[in-house]
Structure formats: structure tokens, C-alpha cells
Image: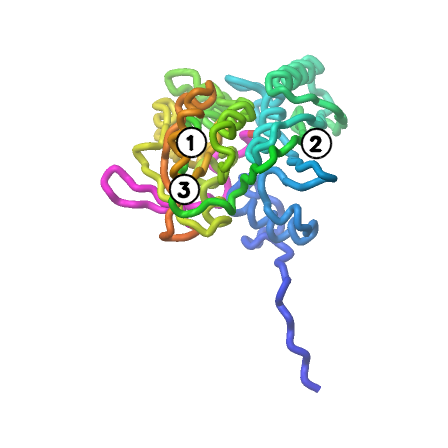
Amino acid sequence: MAEPALDFEGWTCPLPLRDHPNVVMGHGGGGQMSAELIEHLFVPAFANPVLDGLTDSAVFTLGDVRLAFSTDSFVVQPLFFPGGSIGHLAVNGTVNDLAMSGAQAAYLSCGFILEEGVELSVVGRIAADLGDAARRAGVTVATGDTKVVDAGHGDGVYINTAGVGLVPAGVDIRPQRAVPGDVVIVSGQIGVHGIAIMSVREGVSFGTEVVSDCAPLNGLVATMLAVCADLHVLRDPTRGGVATSLNEIAKSAGVGIELTESALPVPETVANACSFLGLDPLYVANEGKLLAIVPRDEADAVLAAMRSHPLGSDAAVIGECVVAHPGMVVTRTAFGATRVVDTPIGEQLPRIC
């Protein structure tokens, strides 16, 4: 009897495609290795329609209410840095993930994982920062949990937060909505957070103190939605920076994205630090910036609204979505040439959030 034909539809690879038998740092970097870990291990295990979008926050209907829900974990080193701390990140990171769906965060959960031996004064300072950040973002920390692990089995303090918020009626913000002709806007200077972390972690001075841009973006998003309810895509370019976020959008929407190199708002301190360290600012993390992809005929109004807000005063148009090279991001240089801006395999600066 003939062997039955094998049906390969629906098959998944049980390991990330790069065939690492163990987890490596690159799996947490937000680049290609992270994507492979998620797509080939976690997505098949958790498969459901809500998860399928793989956006920073899930959007779903509960009863007759449309909600956004997100969770994030924070393992940054050092715990305190110029412009913030792990406590600030734990609030702003989740608030911003919800904002990228157009939602105003309402309630957060907060889980602390503490290493035995960490000073209670450090934990208290982080908790105070977290509470202050929540009040500034207008969100309530409604529930939480604390666990302690043995000395040597943690790294001082890890935090997980999850958040929920309402999505306004008529708002549909997701990466699949980018279309050719759309304009790409960034809310301000890029690469600041990653360089701030690197400067204190490695004790490297770049001539002036680089301060993290860690901030809640829900107010800025509300200002944008007030002038254009039809924002197509929002994304906060954290791990992997602007380059990784735009590559994810281009692949999700099946469009090409062309950037203008001279339009990228890279502050001099970041440019100098990247030159010294051999980094590309497009791949350096941000914690208080957003990317917006908007219809061309709404771009001027959105840009003006962003510039009217303190967190968008340096907003700039940096590119557009195009029909050519779908799924790819390229940059037009000052010399008229183009270069491909690919997704990194791992991460230039690990543990920045």
C-alpha cells in the first residue's frame, strides 16, 4: 500500500530558525531572533485570533466595550539612569504600548521580582518612581504582586506591568493599514534612551550628559487623534529602534518604506556617540518617541498638532510608504544613493528596558 501523502500545511518549526539549542541574549533584542522565537515557539502554542495581529497591545471587544490590553517586563541595567529609572520605564512602557493602539491607559498591574539581598531603600526608590510616573500618565496601579528569588538568581529588581485602556470609537490603528502614499513622521530626536543607558552602564562620557527620553505618550496620541481620527499606524520604536519598527510595519502591510537620511532628527550627542561606538542611530532604542504613518492629506495637520505638544515639538516627516520593494525599508542618502535598512539579527544594546 502506498504511503499517504504528507500534509505540511500548518506545520511549524519547534525551534527558532537560527537553530540555537539554548536561549541567547539576541532572543530578547527585538530583532530577527526575537521574531523567530515568537513566531515559531509562542504563536503556535498560544494560537488565537486576538494574538494573530502581534501588535504591542491586543485590541478586542468585551461585551460592547472595545479594549486594548498589553503587558511588558523590564530588566534594564542600571536600575537608575539620567532621566529615569526602571520604575519610570515600567509605567511608560506599558502606557505607550496601549497608546500605539489609540487607547488611553486606565489601569495597570505591577509585579516586582526582587533578588535576595537588594537594599530596601533601592526598592523603595523604584516604587516611588513608579507611583510618580503613574500619576503623571494619569493611570491607576490597581493590583500587584511581589516575589523574591535567591541571591545570585536575579539582578536586583525586575518589574512586569500589564495595562488596559479604552479604544475610542472609530479608531483603527494597526500596522496592516499602511498604504503607498502614506507619510512617515517621527515625534522627535531618536536614539537618546539607548545612548543614555550605554553612557552610564559603561562609564563612557560623550562630552555632555545624555538624558533618556522616557515619557508617557498617551497625551501626545490624544492630541493627534483630535485632528485626525484616521491615523493608520503608530509605533513606539523601543528595542531595535526606528529601523526595526519600520521593518515590522513594512512587512505587515506589504509596502515599501523610503526614508530621507537628511530628515532624520539625530541629536549631535547621539550622532557622536554612535560614531564613537560604531552604532547606527536608526537601531538605537527610544522610550519617549513614536512613529506615525498617516494619510498624505492629513500629514500637515497631524504634524502641526504634534509640534504643539511638549513631547512632539521636534516632530519631523522622515519618509513615505511606496509601492516599490514591498516589505523593505530603504534610506535615500545625501548623495542620491539608497541603502537597505534591514532588521538587526539581535540588538546593538541589550537590556535597555
Q: Residues within 10 Å of mark 2 (few under 14, many from 20)?
A: few
Q: How many marks?
A: 3
Which secondary structure, mark 1?
strand
| Residue at image location 32% in from the left, 32% down from the top | 263
Earlier in the chain: of badge 3 and badge 2, it is: 2
Which residue is rendered at x = 42% and y = 31% of the image? Answer: 186
Residue 20 as seen in the image, left or right of residue 338? right
- The amino acid type, in three-letter code, at marker 2 is His
Res 102 quadrant in image: top right
Please tell me whether residue 210 is drawn above or below residue 97 in the rendered image: above
| CA distance separating discs 1 and 2 | 39 Å
Badge 2 element: loop
Q: Is residue 16 visible?
A: yes
Which mark's residue is nearer the viewer, 3 or 2?
A: 3
Q: CA distance from mark 3 to mark 2?
A: 48 Å
Q: Is residue 21 magenta?
A: no
Q: Is residue 250 above or below residue 89?
A: below
| Residue 5: % across, % down | 64, 77
SS of the residue at dot 3? loop
Packing grade of label 3 (10 A; few <14, some 14-19, many >=20) is many
- Span of residues in magenta: 328-352
- Give the residue at mark 3: 182
Q: Is residue 72 left or right of residue 290?
A: right
Residue 153, numbered label:
2
Query: Label 1, on which residue?
Result: 186
